[in-house]
Amino acid sequence: MDRGFLNVILLGFGFMFVFTAFQTMGNIEQTVLDSIHADDPSFTGKGYTSLAVIYAVFAVCNWAAPSIISVIGPRAAICLGAVTYGFFIATFLYPSTWLLYASSAVIGFGAAVIWTGQGSYLTLNSTKETISRNSGVFWAMLQCSMFFGNIFVTFMFQGKTHIDEPTRRLVFSVLLGVAALGFVFVLLLRPAVQTVEMEKRDKSTTGPMYALKRAGHLSLTKNMALLSVTFFYTGLELSFFSGVYSPSIGFTKQMGENAKQLVGLSGIFIGLGEVIGGALFGLLGRRTTRSGRDPIVIMGFLIHAASFFLIFLNLPNNANLGDTSDDAYITSNQYVALLCSFLLGFGDSCFNTQIFSILGGLYPEDSAPVFALFKFTQSVSAAISFFYSTLLGLYVQLGILVVSGTVGTVTFCLVEWSERYNKKSESPINSESSDPDNISPRTPALPHD
């Protein structure tokens, strides 16, 4: 096993454990906070609002993240971010409305640092030939986090219509321990093959102001403008499946007495879809991308569209707003609900593995700025989505997802087709352009556009 791939594996384990804790919390947050409010009416914190604060701060801090990474490097940034995730989970042991929102802001900063550091570190450990493989392996390992925490939560919530305090404290304590284990793994990250030269160059010839200006310049390029539409859609669907859909199942009383237990099961099936997608499009590498990245993204959107339609039929319009006995268009069915969870996860993996691949392939020397722009756009849309999730019914949200998904898929394909055409034009004979991982920027005047 080469050194770069070993670093990707360590990175995957670190993120798997940190996000086992966080994604499980995100999945159950609204459900748990409703139970806390029932026990203590003075507690008025809302899960959707907390998640909105996280992603709003995340969006703002993404502009500072490249500068921070240019000073401390991606490995230290990942460690710093991991600490904030542990802090956020620890605050649930002592529920307080102001502390909930304050810790949400702290983790928003940490998310910007850890994800920009992750994109930079993954790129430093990859080549154009291995970026798809490494992206897929990392994504599959990351999404294993959806299994462990949600299996635990499903067991803990079994037969409960109200999540009592002893159960909550045990769940939070275990998740905090899992986050600490993830921190140990990120501490073990070693310099990559490219890290020594590139980190030295960053500190000696670029610096924080250059990193900020570079991010601003790249945001104005044609390709990045088009890809930003795709990024925006991934933020909307991320917020939907990670914080809205699973609680909506739990709030639907027509699902039966074990509706709350389905919240954890939904997270497991989302993770199953994510892992299978990551394995197919990453571990198989060149085989799945031989025809380009666009077929995978188009397939991901079609799968999402099918899941949105089934959710529209299977859940009542007000299922995202609290417990409801209203009827859906069909009799609400647990198996259909879990199938939709799987489809949401699989479709998300289609988009994210190909976004990681195209950014790592087109912008290998600007990994921190481009991944910061990706996470900035994604987190802005996620924050917007969580804010309107408290105001809009489920059906309107599904309509927004269909429209934004259609446009985002088209813009991704335009970039992929444009770069493939330009690569073929530059090397019409004996070209390796049929492999999209070999695509390279074409003009030095506007790098990587």
Image (tube, rainbow, N blue to C red):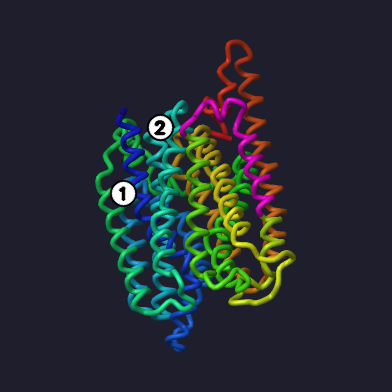
Q: Amino acid at mark 2?
A: Ser
Reply above or below: 371 against 160.
above
Q: Residue 43: x and y, percent?
A: 44, 84
Q: Residue 144: x and y, percent?
A: 42, 49
Horizontally, residue 224 falls left or right of residue 156, namely right
Horizontally, residue 28 falls left or right of residue 312, namely left
Residue carrying label 1: 72
Horizontally, residue 102 falls left or right of residue 228, namely left
Query: Does dot 2 land on a helix, a strand or a loop?
Result: loop
Residue 297 forms part of the magenta stretch: yes
Q: Is residue 437 visible?
A: yes
Label the magenta part by its dominant secondary structure. Answer: helix
Which of the image's four quarters has the N terminus? top left
Count neighbours of disc 2 (C-alpha within 10 A) and say few if under 14, some if 14 to 19, many if 20 or more: many
> Which residue occupies 67% across, 43% down?
409
Query: Does dot 1 land on a helix, a strand or a loop?
Result: helix
- Nearest the viewer among 252 and 159 is 159
Q: Residue 11: x and y, percent?
A: 34, 44
- Considering only order in the chain, which callout, 1 or 2, is on the residue closer to the N terminus? 1
Q: Residue 63: x and y, percent?
A: 48, 54
Q: Amino acid at mark 1?
A: Ile
Residue carrying label 2: 126
